[in-house]
Amino acid sequence: MPLLEIKVNGRDHQLVVDATASLLTVLREHLHITGPKVGCETGDCGACSVLVDGKLRRACLTNALSVQGADVVTVEGVGGSGRLHPIQKAFYENHASQCGFCTPGMIMASKALLDENPNPTEMEIKEALAGNLCRCTGYINIIRAVKDAAEKMAHGGGDR
Amino acid sequence: MTLKNVGKSKPRYNGLGHVTGEARYVDDIFVPGTLAVKALRSPVHKGIIRKLDISKAEKLPGVYGVITAADVPCNTYGYLTLDQAVLADKAVRFMGEPIAAVAADTVEIANEALDLIGLDIEQQTPVFDPLEAMKPDAPKVRPEGNVLMVGNRPYRLVYNGDIEKGFAQADEIVENEFFFPSQEHAPMETQVSLAVPENNSRLTIYTVTQGMYFLLKQLQRILGQGDDVSHRWSERMQYSFRGHLGFCDIKYVGGNVGGAFGGKTELHADGIAALLALKTGRPCKWRWTREEEMLYSARHSPWRMTFKDGVTKDGRIVARKVFSVHDAGAYTGLSSYVVDKHAFYVAGPYYLPNVEVKCSVVYTNRVPTGAIRGFGVTPGTYACEIQMNMIAERLGMDPWELRFINAMRNGDQLATRTKLESVYLLETMKKLAEVVNHPLDEKYAALTSDPREA
Amino acid sequence: MKKRGKGIAMAFYPTGMGGGGDFTNAVVKIKPDGTADLIIGSVELGQGVSTVLPQMVAEVLGIEYEQVKFINDNTDACPICFGSFASRVTYFAGNAAVEAATNARQKLFEIAAPDLDAPPELLEAVDGMIRVKGRPEKSLPIGQVAMKGLYELHEFVVGTGTFGRPRSIPDPETGACNPLVTMAWAATQIEVEVDTETGVVKILDSKSVYDVGKAINPELVKGQVEGGAIMGMSWAILENLYPDYPSPKFQPRSLGEYMISTAMDIPEIETVIVECPSPEGPWGAKGIGEMTANPPAPAVVNAVHDAIGVWITDIPITPEKVLRALEKKKGAERNGA
Amino acid sequence: MLNETFYSPGDLGQAWSLLSDLGDKAIIIAGGTDLMVRFNRHRRKRSEILVYVGKLGLNVIEETDGQMVIGACASLADITASTVVRQKLPLLARACGEMASPAVRNAATLGGNLVTNARTADGVAALMALGAVVVTASAAGETRMPVEQFVSTPRRQKLANGGIVKQFEIPCLTADEKWGWEKLKQRQGDSRSILSVSVRARMEGDICRSIRLVLGGMAANPFVSKTAVQLLEGRPLSPNLVDRVAEEILSETDAGTDARATAWYREKAAQVLVRRVLTQIA
């Protein structure tokens, strides 16, 4: 069976995986990193969004072995121990979650956006989040949170 | 005294868990030795099971248990009518109805085991259109008939006043039909159940349900302690449980759900996961795929509604007659309750001296419908509010004006003859008019929800 | 050509199950540090029960919201709640939690009374203190009172509460019954833009006013209204599980085939909360979780009519339905002319 | 020797030899956005072996002498973001940028869009309108064929003997060329096309030259319209002629009814979109 070497949230892992296994299966079933959620396994909902070498990816549509040696960041690795990333803080303070199931994916999509574009327009935020479905909030507070995070990050802040 | 907590926008109690990924949902719980569950579902809309052979599936390496109707201690359940089977025994009434279920080491093996089950179903003619199903010669979804009887009537009747007298006072009759389609709740978390046999012959179910105690009673019945059930604990059950499980033998663990909107009210996954846990003595997890969720979970019922209103030239609704047909799908589920709630409120938030509502539950060969945000009132509001604009158009009147003339006030009655208090419709509409800058005639701006003069 | 229109819709919605018979129990337990546990079987599914109930308990006990733990995770330990549905939890579980907290507070008053030299009925719980009404200098920290009760007097400082409604069965002949707990009210206006060539409907703006009785947590209430509004608009123009109803053909199998609104599909949205208290609700609160999805669909239908003069009374208003309705209208006008 | 279930060849030579040895058992995986959906159904298929082609260096995007070369494994996101593509082939940047969602565009490849052979593949429609050539490569050498020819050629003929799609070669827009793109979606975000219309043409004043008008979602595959060529080539783009193209183009279509739309609607909407793209280049 093929061997996968992968870094997740700063920690190196070596594990044996199926050829067809998704990154989502590896994260959840092998490593028990449960921030990325199983919402559809067809790439439609975005609840499993993670960063692979800095790029936003669907963990469910990412063949694990195809990202051999990659650096993966999930919501658990965004803030660091005991600290909230400004995006996490902004989501919390802006009531941007309701059931919370889409939130880890939303935070990763927001991070991918702000890493590339620290000062996005509302339309750019909406485009960046277009692949992350939320059935609870109507996206209003999520968009507000991303704007808030962008502003706070421009002024350097956001510890827990 | 000034309020310190109530009325304040405190942060969400579990908000930090959401943003850090620490919040745990059922699928995030891992119990060592957990088996994966998959169900064999009916490939036809309507049929009779002629043969069900699980012997090959049971022998597949990695399979721990296969259950069929024969394994279910009490194979009828339902909140209102005990008409649904956990696993179909003979008749299948909708495509996707579970027939057998497998617990295996992996999802892949469970899926392979499903392919090894020998299933022979004699197809029968299904019926999908409730209007067709209501006809006497329509194929029968259920032997007792396609329309749910309410007492001796094929509909729920709710009326107040004298509808014919009302129509006699009318200058215009406005009659229209409305259709409200079926929707999926589409929460981001699908149905998940993890059933874990515990110490002391207890069973813990990690559940996504919206009402733990609500569902617990259903599960208790299925597992063999229904009031009117003679215990039929199958010998095929290998695990050393006592003869039956009661209310206190089952522990539901839940309370944190990834969205529901009504879709996690019915018994979707818990029954089969529990039965397989008992059968195998191992923890069993059944996570529905999104496809299963889309195709087979309870959904919004399609509704057809007819409004016939008698109105006067000056814009008063003097008679409103509503007939609604609720497409329940193949089993009752919560339908009779939905239809009652619909009947109570479909006529809308208006003063209606003469109102009559008839509402039928009709069975068809589709997935049973269930609770959803708005529970029967949603299609009512939809039809009523379009009808109001259609009346306004007929009378050449501003739709705002028509609503101000007829808006409910304190002391007005529902169709159920219930008197209302804390009515605030006129005030709410006035506020909206202000927010959207809609000019209001002084006489409407002066209206309040104070009781109308007799 | 693109044409714009506005439509309104009103809504009322009853709090609680239509047939009654449901109830919720609650336990509030005071801990030695003066914080409290609310133990209750109500499920959190995003609506915010785990936030608003602790707010209520904190209010009654005069402590901070952060000092109340919400314990709802299993049926062994948590008292019965019928469930998180029927817009019932803020009202039913709220009343039960308030009663439980009030009873727990009463125990604290009884424990503190001798030390404060005042009868329990003259005491109040404010800012983490049990104190004599009108004499704030005569006070004891709640933690100290709880400690005394638990460790010296061996009192179980706990309160229970329950709230329910009798069953109401409709009269089989008339349908008469009393299903009502309380009623919330709403008014919405939606503006749309219709592309008369492709039939595509775009929702531009949604403004709503909701009477919620009392907003226990205004941001959470707003979140319900906004989320419901987007769901309702999504129903109005996108969602259909049976595109060829009543035939089961073309049933969507994924979230790529079954379209719900994305962040790019949402309009400008404005929510205004008004408060007409319900006599029996906690601080007058009413349940509004479900109704927020109700006014958008008819408002969109009315707005489309305002824009292009056709009635589409079978949502979702797909581009095809718009084009067919416009053709029919054109045909009728031609025949009429 | 070939006892692994997953291979990630590092160059084309390795890939060709693997693919010809494995034969039908090989499944080529690149971005994975289509294949993983299938694997996520969790069905055991013991005989299938994956060959990952993401490490073959097939993600180039470069322009030389008016010709753009885009590697088969270039992601839709890279194409959309590429400055040179945005300048020289804005139609392609636009079409790729409207497909799926950001995370999927980061993984999905243009080559994948071609080989999955979808009815409404927007990337393929744009490539056809642009007159792109597909380069397939095997140990036997390279083969070039227009995208529309590739789409209509059976798989065995076009990808024999371990051949894979290597790259696309696309003539860049010149100063006198115009383009147009219209896509009808079910919703604004992350939506497959109901149909798309794309066009590329050289305008001499109002005279239309070398027009390539492509309809997506109107037949089994996107196709280049012959009607547009017949009616517009060498003629001024008048409103009357635009109307005629919109009407007569339907003789070429085979619009189907599916969950997204009926054939009736597709035909109505196709005419509107054809008018709109032709107005864009007028």
Image: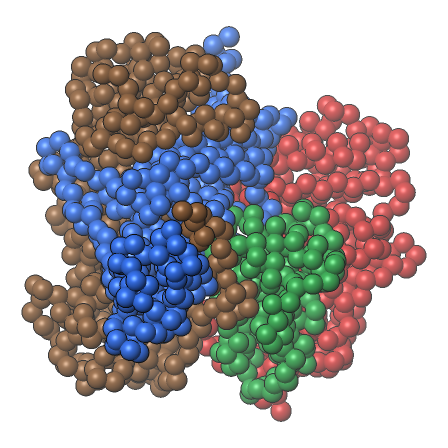
Q: Colour of chain D?
A: red
Is A99 placed left or right of D154 in the picture? left
Q: Colour of chain B?
A: brown
- From the top left corner, tell me how far across and down residue A73 is, in percent: 63, 72
Q: In the figure, the blue chain has which letter?
A: C
Is A147 placed left or right of B161 in the picture? right
- From the top left corner, tell me how far across and down residue B363 is, in percent: 23, 45
Is C151 placed left or right of D25 in the picture? left
- From the top left corner, tell me how far across and down residue A158 is, in percent: 66, 64
Q: Quadrant of the C terminus of chain A?
A: bottom right
Extreme-right residue of the structure:
D65
Name which residue lies at 13% across and 79% down: B243
**In which quadrant of the rendered view does residue B320 lie?**
top left
**In which quadrant of the rendered view does residue C159 lie?**
bottom left
Q: Nearer the viewer, residue C55 or D133?
A: C55
Name which residue lies at 76% across and 47% down: D91
Image label count:
0
Q: In the figure, the green chain has which letter?
A: A
